[in-house]
Image (cartoon, coloured by chain):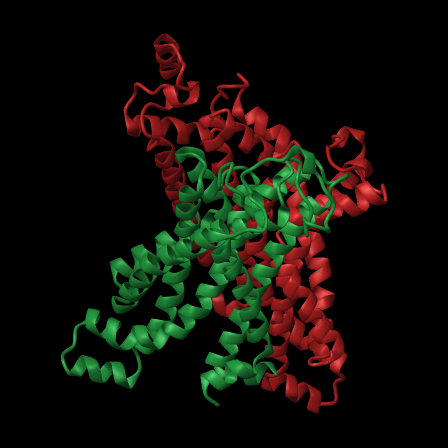
C-alpha cells in the first residue's frame, strides 16, 4: 500500500491533520481579522460568561477570549516550529557526522554532549536561559530549540548507523564518494520519514513547553496574548470565571492532541511493519 | 557487576563536573557585571563594588568556579543575596516539599500505569484497549498545570474536599501534609501515567509475541501465569527506563505545579530567585536539581544491570 493511501485510510492522521489545520488557520486568520479587538480593554464587558457576542466569554479586562485564543495560536506555533527548525538544523548534521565517524573521538564528543544536555530537564534549561537573558519569545525559542538538538542528533545518528552497513552505501563508498556526499545523497533521504515523525512529536512538546514558560512568566510578554499567559491570568479567578481557564487550556490540549495523532498516523503509514504489528 | 558500577560512577562524576561548568558559564555570560545585574539599573556604584567584593567577583574565572564547586562539595551553596541566609538553608527547607511531591507523583503514576497497561495489552484490540489508548492519548496532550487548575476547580472550589493551595508543613502531621500534596501529585502523575501505560502496553505486547512465551503457553501455562512469570519481567526493562526518565520530568514539573498550588518548594525558590535576580540561589538550585536527575539516571542504570545481566558487559 502506498504511503499516500495509507495516510488517507488512517483515521488518526485524518483527525490529527484536521485539528492541526484548524489552529494553523486560526493563527493565520488572526493576523488580519479577529471577532473582537484584543488590544482594547473594555471594562464594561469584563468577565462575561460564554455566549452571545463573546463565544468563549471575556476576561477581567473585557477582552474576547475567543479572539485571544486565535491570536495566542501565533506564538505557540511560531515558537514550536522555529525550535524544531533549530533542533533539526543543528541536530541532524551532528548526528549524521557522528554516524559517519562512528567510534571516533568526534562521535564520542557529540554523543557525550548530548547526554549532558539530557541530564538537564528541558524545562530547567529553558528556565535557566530565560533567567539569564530575560523572558521573551526569542529566548523561549532558543531554550526549547537547544533541547531539540540532542533529540534529532540521536535519532539521525541511530538511523544512519544502520544505513552505513547497507549495500547501497557500500556501493557509494566503493565508487569513491566521500562521507559528506554519502550522508547528503544516500543517508539523509532515507531517514527523512523518521525525522518528520520526530518533528511532529517535538513540535507538540514545543507547544507544551512554550505554554509552561509563558505560564510562569518567562515566555511571551504582555500585552501579546499567549495561551500560557492566559492560563496564569485565569488562575486567581478560577472560582468565579472558570471559562477564562477552560478555553485556553482546551486550545493547548486539542493542538497537542492533533499533532500527536498526526505523528502516530504518519509513523504507521511510513513504517508498514509497525502498523501491522500494532493492529 | 562491580566494574560496571564503577564505570557508571566515573561517568556520573564527569557528567556532574560538566553540568556544573555549563551552569557556571551560563550565569557568567550575563552581559555586564553580575553584581550590577543583581542590584538593578539604579544601583549606587559603591553598592555594586561592595557586592562584587562579597561575591568574590574580583577573582579570576577559574578561581571563582573552583570556589563555587568546592563549596558545593562541602554543602556550602553560598549566601543568598536577597534573603541574607545560606542558600543551603533555603534549599533544605524547601526540598522537603518538592522531593516528596515528585516521589508521590511517581508512585501514583506507576500505580495507575501498571494495571492500565496490563489490561490494555491483555485485551489487545478490545473495547477496553481502545478506550485506554484514547484516554492516554488525551492524557499526554494535557499540560499538567492546566490539569492542576481543573482539579482545583472541581475538588477544591466545587466539592471542597481539598484546599486550593498552600502547605501546612510536615509538623501539622503526615496526613494533613500528604493531603495538601495530593492534588498537585495527581496533576503531575496523570500525564506521566498516560505515557507509562502506553509503554507498558507496547512492551508487554512485544514480549507476548516472543517464542518463549509461545513455548510457555504450549507447555500448558495459562495466560495469567505466562504474564506473571515470563512476560511482565521482561517487559519491565523499557518500563524501568521510562520511570527513571519520568523522575526528572516530575521534578521539573513540580517546579511549575508548585506555582499553581502556592507550595513553598524549590520551584517557588527558583522563580523568586529569578525575579529578584538572586543568581546564587538560581545557580545552586538548578545544580541541585541536575544532581538529583543524574543520580536517578545512575540508579536506573544499575537497576537495569540487575534485571538484565547482558547489560553488565
Residue A228 in view here? yes
Tell me if I can see residue B313 in this picture: no
**On the rendered image, what quadrant is the C terminus of chain B found in?**
bottom left
Q: Residue at x 35, y 12 (%)?
A: B49
Q: Residue furthest left?
A: A176
Where on the picture, by quarter, is residue B62? top left
The residue lying at 65 percent from left, 55 percent from top is A250
Hue used for the chain lettered A? green
Front position in the image: A195 or A207: A207
Q: Is residue B110 left or right of residue B92?
A: right
Up-down relation of residue A47 to residue B206 (above or below): above
Q: Image point 36% across, 38% down: which residue? A: B21
Q: Residue at (56%, 83%) from the top-left corner? A: A9
Point out the residue furthest to the top here: B46
Q: Is A142 left, or right, of A17 in this rendering?
A: left
- Count of numbered labels shown in the rendering: 0
| Residue B11 on image: x %, y % | 41, 50
Question: Quick one: B196 or A9, which is closer to the camera?
Answer: A9
Q: Quadrant of residue B201?
A: bottom right
Position of B274 with respect to B150 (left or right) is: left
Chain ID, red in image:
B
What is the x, y in percent for residue B286?
Answer: 49, 37
In this rendering, is residue B100 above or below A247? above
Residue A37: x and y, percent? Answer: 55, 44
Amino acid at each position: 500500500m502506498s504511503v499516500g493511501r495509507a495516510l488517507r485510510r488512517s483515521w488518526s492522521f485524518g483527525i490529527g491533520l484536521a485539528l492541526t489545520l484548524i489552529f494553523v488557520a486560526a493563527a493565520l486568520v488572526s493576523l488580519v481579522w479577529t471577532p473582537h479587538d484584543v488590544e482594547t480593554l473594555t471594562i464594561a464587558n469584563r468577565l462575561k460568561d460564554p455566549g452571545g457576542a463573546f463565544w468563549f466569554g471575556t476576561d477581567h479586562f473585557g477582552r474576547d477570549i475567543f479572539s485571544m485564543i486565535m491570536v495566542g495560536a501565533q506564538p505557540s506555533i511560531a515558537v514550536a516550529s522555529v525550535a524544531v527548525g533549530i533542533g533539526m538544523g543543528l541536530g541532524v548534521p551532528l548526528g549524521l557526522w557522528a554516524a559517519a565517524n562512528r567510534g571516533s573521538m568526534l562521535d564520542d564528543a557529540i554523543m557525550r554532549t548530548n547526554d549532558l544536555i539530557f541530564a538537564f530537564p528541558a524545562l530547567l534549561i529553558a528556565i535557566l536561559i530565560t533567567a539569564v537573558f530575560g523572558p521573551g519569545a526569542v529566548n523561549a525559542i532558543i531554550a526549547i530549540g537547544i533541547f531539540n538538538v540532542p533529540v534529532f542528533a540521536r535519532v539521525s545518528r541511530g538511523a544512519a548507523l544502520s544505513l552505513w552497513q547497507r549495500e547501497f552505501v557500500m556501493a557509494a563508498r566503493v565508487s569513491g564518494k566521500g562521507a559528506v556526499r554519502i550522508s547528503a545523497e544516500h543517508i539523509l533521504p532515507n531517514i527523512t520519514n523518521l525525522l518528520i515523525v520526530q518533528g511532529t512529536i517535538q513540535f507538540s512538546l514545543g507547544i507544551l513547553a512554550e505554554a509552561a514558560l509563558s505560564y510562569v512568566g518567562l515566555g511571551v510578554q504582555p500585552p501579546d496574548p499567549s495561551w500560557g499567559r492566559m492560563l496564569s491570568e485565569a488562575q486567581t479567578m478560577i472560582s468565579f470565571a472558570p471559562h477564562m481557564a477552560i478555553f485556553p487550556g482546551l486550545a493547548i490540549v486539542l493542538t497537542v492532541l492533533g499533532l500527536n495523532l498526526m505523528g502516530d498516523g504518519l509513523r504507521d503509514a511510513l513504517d508498514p511493519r509497525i502498523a501491522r504489528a500494532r493492529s | 557487576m562491580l566494574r560496571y558500577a564503577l564505570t557508571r560512577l566515573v561517568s556520573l562524576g564527569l557528567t556532574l563536573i560538566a553540568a556544573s561548568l555549563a551552569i557556571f558559564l551560563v550565569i557568567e555570560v550575563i552581559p555586564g557585571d553580575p553584581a550590577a545585574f543583581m542590584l538593578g539599573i539604579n544601583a549606587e556604584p559603591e553598592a555594586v563594588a561592595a557586592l562584587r567584593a562579597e561575591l568574590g567577583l574580583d577573582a579570576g574565572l577559574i578561581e571563582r568556579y573552583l570556589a563555587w564547586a568546592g563549596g558545593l562539595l562541602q554543602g556550602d551553596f553560598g549566601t543568598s543575596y536577597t534573603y541574607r541566609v545560606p542558600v543551603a538553608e533555603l534549599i533544605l527547607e524547601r526540598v522537603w516539599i518538592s522531593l516528596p511531591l515528585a516521589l508521590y507523583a511517581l508512585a501514583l503514576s506507576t500505580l495507575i500505569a501498571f494495571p492500565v497497561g496490563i489490561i490494555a495489552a491483555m485485551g489487545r484490540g478490545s473495547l477496553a484497549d481502545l478506550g485506554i489508548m484514547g484516554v492516554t492519548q488525551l492524557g499526554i496532550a494535557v499540560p499538567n498545570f492546566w490539569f492542576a487548575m481543573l482539579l482545583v476547580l472541581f475538588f477544591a472550589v466545587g466539592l471542597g474536599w481539598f484546599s486550593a493551595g498552600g502547605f501546612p508543613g510536615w509538623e501539622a502531621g503526615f496526613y494533613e501534609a500528604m493531603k495538601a500534596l495530593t492534588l498537585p501529585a495527581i496533576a503531575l502523575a496523570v500525564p506521566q501515567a498516560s505515557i507509562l501505560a502506553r509503554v507498558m502496553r507496547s512492551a508487554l505486547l512485544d514480549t507476548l509475541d516472543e517464542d518463549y512465551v509461545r513455548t510457555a503457553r504450549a507447555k500448558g501455562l495459562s495466560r495469567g501465569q505466562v504474564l506473571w512469570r515470563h512476560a511482565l519481567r521482561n517487559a519491565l526493562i523499557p518500563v524501568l527506563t521510562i520511570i527513571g526518565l519520568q523522575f526528572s520530568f516530575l521534578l521539573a514539573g513540580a517546579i511549575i505545579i508548585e506555582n499553581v498550588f502556592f507550595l513553598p518548594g524549590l520551584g517557588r525558590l527558583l522563580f523568586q530567585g529569578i525575579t529578584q535576580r538572586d543568581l546564587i540561589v538560581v545557580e545552586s538550585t538548578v545544580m541541585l536539581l541536575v544532581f538529583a536527575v543524574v543520580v536517578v539516571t545512575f540508579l536506573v542504570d544499575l537497576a537495569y544491570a540487575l534485571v538484565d545481566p547482558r547489560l553488565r558487559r
